[in-house]
């Protein structure tokens, strides 16, 4: 008899959390690491939100509450989503979750039978791909290309849709690329979905970075387009917009109340309800006039950093980098660095089992961490299937500019350290 169920190791992970052990080990042995891995804004939660959390605690709002989410928050979410997407959302279609992450896996459990195909962006948030094999679904990566600044055309999507397609993930602005799908692209994508998919196919529109848009561009949701509201799950949350990743408040707006109730029942089964005092503070975040200036200050700081770091990266030998239009990540192509350091050839010589565990960009990631004390994420951390031959890293700009500049200088040193790389590959300290 086996200890673990067959499905146990079919679930993957989010390396941004796993890399922490390596970073801690390097810091303990060699000193400070510049962390360009962080998927959370580096700002405190705005004061008015913190004050409301405290006030709610003093009101003893600390008990079980509605598993669907407290009505006051669902009303505020319905109002905000309606106003920003041009829709008329009833609060009964809204379900609150502990963060933006849980509904990603829940929708696969609810909508997919074994053998159903799930289309998802790659590179993309790793949890989309991670769950698919766990629920016996069939992963269908939608590869995003640098040449279109990591967006995709309706033709690309059209070729992936089949009679077995059940779920399509979209994510704009995107983690890890910062890519933003244009309104024209969205219209063509919606037309393709309406044309090729039956009404039971769901689009999961992950809009968690909706408020972190640069260059005065506005966020657009596919749910706003004619015919799409009844097929789209709009997912968002409070982690990124309000720099509140520890608050664990996210939500999804479902096409119908009855679908929302299915997810309410999953909430009951998994965690009963979401922390009520945080939910009330989330309601305040949506309603308070103090939120808009706090968020726009954060976004303009991200934009300033993006401009500086994007320019620096493009000045480095062996790197090309597209300009992200939203979120707080840059996703440079490091093919030239991998080639210069001999990592592509080295990788070719590895055994199939060793190759599974890394990539040329993954080797560079570990070299940069262990020998130059700068932490980044590799391409393979954002969807494994079909990622071969793609040499990218993700840098988060959720740190002060001085820290980011130090990180870029360290990456530049790593990129030119032909001697160091040989020692690294001989010793592979990351495997010890
Ligand atoms: C695209 C995307 N969706 C969802 C999440 C999950 O957010 P949360 O921390 O609210 O669970 C993240 C977090 O990094 C993300 O990047």
Image: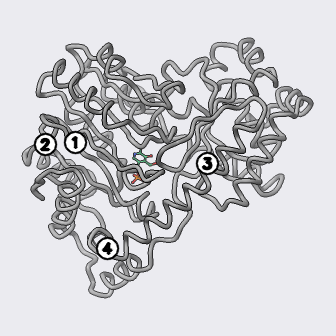
Q: Residue furthest right?
A: 419
- Residue annotated with mark 3: 37
Query: Colour scheme of this structure image?
Result: one colour
Q: Residue at x 41, y 22 (%)?
A: 141
Q: Tell me which label, 4 or 1, sits earlier in the chain.
A: 1
Between residues 10 and 340, which one lies in front from this camera angle?
340
- Residue annotated with mark 4: 281
Q: Residue 344 location in percent, x, y?
A: 73, 18
Rendering quarter of residue 132: top left
Residue 261 lies left or right of residue 295; in this view the side is left
**Mark 4: secondary structure:** helix
Up the image or down, 152 lies above or below 375; here it is: above
- Residue annotated with mark 2: 255
**Tag 1–tag 2 contact (CB < 8 Å):** yes
Please tell me the numbered disc located at residue 233. 1
**Tag 4–tag 2 contact (CB < 8 Å):** no
């Amino acid at each position: 008899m086996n200890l673990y169920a067959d499905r146990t190791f079919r679930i993957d992970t989010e390396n941004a959390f796993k890399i922490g052990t390596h970073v801690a080990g390097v810091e303990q042995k060699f000193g400070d690491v510049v962390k360009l891995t962080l998927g959370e804004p580096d700002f405190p939660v705005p004061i008015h939100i913190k004050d409301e959390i405290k006030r709610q605690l003093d009101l003893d709002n600390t008990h079980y509450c509605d598993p669907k989410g407290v009505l006051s928050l669902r009303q505020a979410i319905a109002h905000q989503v309606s106003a920003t997407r041009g829709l008329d959302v009833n609060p009964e279609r809204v379900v609150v979750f502990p963060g933006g992450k849980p509904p990603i896996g829940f929708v696969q459990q609810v909508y997919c039978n074994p053998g159903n195909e799930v289309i998802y962006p790659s590179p993309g948030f790793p949890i989309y791909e991670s769950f698919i094999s766990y629920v016996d679904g069939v992963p269908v990566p939608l590869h995003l290309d640098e040449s279109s600044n990591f967006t995709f055309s309706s033709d690309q999507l059209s070729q992936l849709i089949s009679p077995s397609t059940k779920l399509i993930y979209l994510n704009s602005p995107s983690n890890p690329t910062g890519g933003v799908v244009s309104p024209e692209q969205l219209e063509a994508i919606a037309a393709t979905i309406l044309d090729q998919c039956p009404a039971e196919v769901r689009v999961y529109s992950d809009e968690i970075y909706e408020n972190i848009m640069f260059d005065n561009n506005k966020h657009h949701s596919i749910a706003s387009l004619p015919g799409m509201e009844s097929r789209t799950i709009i997912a968002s949350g409070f982690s990124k917009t309000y720099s509140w990743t520890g608050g664990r408040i996210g939500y999804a707006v479902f096409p119908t109340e009855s679908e929302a109730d299915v997810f309410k029942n999953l909430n009951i089964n998994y965690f009963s309800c979401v922390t009520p005092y945080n939910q009330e503070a989330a309601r305040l975040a949506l309603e308070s006039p103090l939120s808009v200036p706090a968020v726009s200050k954060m976004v303009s700081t991200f934009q300033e950093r993006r401009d500086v770091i994007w320019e620096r990266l493009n000045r480095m030998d062996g790197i090309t980098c597209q300009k992200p239009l939203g979120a707080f990540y840059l996703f440079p192509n490091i093919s030239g660095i991998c080639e210069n350091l001999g990592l592509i050839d080295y990788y070719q010589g590895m055994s199939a089992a060793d190759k599974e565990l890394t990539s040329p960009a993954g080797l560079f990631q570990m070299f940069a961490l262990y020998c130059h004390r700068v932490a980044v994420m590799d391409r393979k951390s954002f969807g494994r299937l079909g990622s071969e031959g793609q040499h990218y890293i993700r840098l988060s700009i959720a740190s002060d500019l001085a820290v980011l500049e130090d990180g870029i200088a360290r990456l530049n040193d790593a990129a030119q350290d032909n001697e160091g790389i040989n020692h690294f590959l001989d010793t592979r300290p990351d495997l010890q």
